[in-house]
Image (cartoon, rainbow, N blue to C red):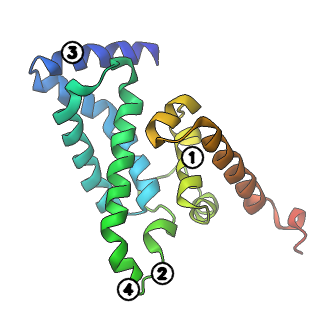
Amino acid sequence: MIFRAVEDADLISRVRKGDVEAFNLLVSRWEKRVFNYLLRLTGNPDDSLDLSQDVFLKAYQNIRKLDDTARFGPWLFRIAHNEAYSHFRKRRPEVDNGDETLIEREPARGPAPDLTIAVTDALGRLTPEQREAVVLKVYEGFKFEEMAVILGTPVSTIKSRLYTALDLLKTELAPTHSRGIR
């Protein structure tokens, strides 16, 4: 990861000097992770693809505002988080008109082979905040401090969400006989 940060910092420096190819390299390095993150939040591959494009466009437009180039990952995921929640706010009226809270509660579908059906279903039963904490920590590997930057939330809140979510997942995914159901 240290090697990647050094490379990202070099690419960012080149982008700031107008090197579009350097930005294309940044996109190719990060696009799969950003797409999968958005897919796990939205549950819709088409929306995730559109949002990914918006994320990288905003990143390109604002890359000069990035203070610490070594923190490119958390900065990029903060943009992705903002784009996803902006998308949820725009879509809320059509959900309120009878669609139950599909956008926030539907489990992720699409090209996510690392998730089993049971795990996907269990993740779908978490609150959006809990699900996002699990995705950022478990699937994306961010540190709590980086998650705090991405989510704009104190570390203590993130830890609470994550540990509550993990407890719920453990209960959901436990074999039926250990849950008292026979």
Rendered position, 21 above or below 7: below
* Callout 4 amino acid: Asn
Which label sits in the foreground, 4 or 1?
4
* Callout 1 amino acid: Ala
Res. 74 image quadrant: top left
Q: Residue at x 81, y 62 (%)?
A: 175
The residue indicated by pointer 4 is: 97
Rendered position, 82 above or below 121: above
The residue indicated by pointer 3 is: 13
The residue indicated by pointer 2 is: 100
Dot 1: element: helix
Rendered position, 160 above or below 39: above
Dot 2: element: loop
Res. 94 image quadrant: bottom left
Left or right of 44 in this view: 151: right
Q: Are marks 3 and 2 in contact (CB under 8 Å)?
A: no
Q: Quadrant of the C terminus?
A: bottom right
Identify the residue at the far left of this view: 18
Q: CA distance from mark 3 to mark 4?
A: 47 Å
Identify the residue at the far bottom of this view: 98
The earlier-in-sequence mark between 4 and 1 is 4
The residue indicated by pointer 1 is: 133
Rendered position, 71 above or below 84: above
